[in-house]
Amino acid sequence: MIIGITGTSGSGKTTVGNILSKREDVFVIDADSVAKELNKPNTSYMKAIRSSLGNDFFLEDGNLDRKKLADEIYSNNNSREKLNSLTFKYVVDEILEIIKNDVDENKNYIVLDAPLLFESGLHNFCDYTISLISEYETKVKRICDRDNITEETAKKRLSIQHDDNYYIEKSDYVINNYAGCNLELEIERIINKIEQI
């Protein structure tokens, strides 16, 4: 069974993924980690980015200039759409290969931790989807702490992402990851519901 987990930056997806990865019956695929693996010099993905966005976003050693690219995609809709379309293609293909070839048959669940689960079409491969939502200020603080960026930059990132209603409407289950939320209990509750279906 494939379960997709998504939500905006700072909503708590990675924490949920980490909790689930401790279960022996779960295989977690982190879409961001898959993308980072593809972000190595001379991969087909890197060549496609260079072809689409140009050489300005690459360092001399062939690696991406991550800060420069991040600044570009958070301020330029056209560049962001170009990068997203490439990322969706290459990351989705790689995730499907992992599902096909790398998952132990003893696992009952494959969990896809994917920020752009719906936008990339990965939700079409999921049996169930779970979204995390949280208070705006909490998300801003989490992003600042995690990425060591300013509050202004964190807010700019959130401003180009969907609001919580987008995830609530599209998901089978929603975890309200507000202050005091016990994520482990919430996950158990949802897994128990799924197992009873």
Image (cartoon, rainbow, N blue to C red):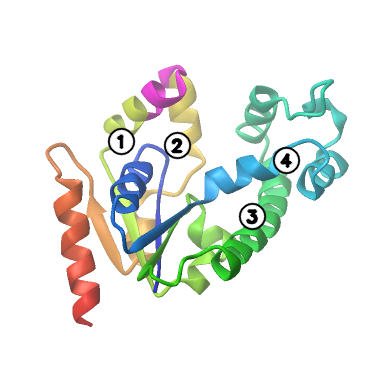
Identify the residue at horizontal 41%, vertical 59% (top origin). 27
- Which residue corresponds to mark 1? 136
Is residue 127 toward the left or the right of residue 79 in the image?
left
Asked which quadrant contains residue 102, the reply is: bottom right
Start and end of the magenta stretch? 143-151
Q: Which circle's residue, 3 or 4, is located before the other in the chain?
A: 4
Q: CB atoms at circles 2 and 4 under 8 Å apart?
A: no
Between the residue at mark 1 and the residue at mark 3, the CA separation in whole angstroms equals 28 Å
- Which residue corresponds to mark 4? 79
Q: Amino acid at mark 2?
A: Leu
Is residue 126 toward the left or the right of residue 69 in the image?
left
Q: CB atoms at circles 2 and 1 under 8 Å apart?
A: yes
> Residue 142 or 168: which is nearer the viewer?
142
Q: Which circle's residue, 2 or 4, is located before the other in the chain?
A: 4
Q: Which circle's residue, 1 or 3, is located before the other in the chain?
A: 3
Between the residue at mark 2 and the residue at mark 4, the CA separation in whole angstroms equals 17 Å
Q: Which circle's residue, 2 or 1, is located before the other in the chain?
A: 1
- Which residue corresponds to mark 2? 158
Q: Vertical placement of 17 versus 74: above or below?
A: below
Asked which quadrant contains residue 55, the reply is: top right
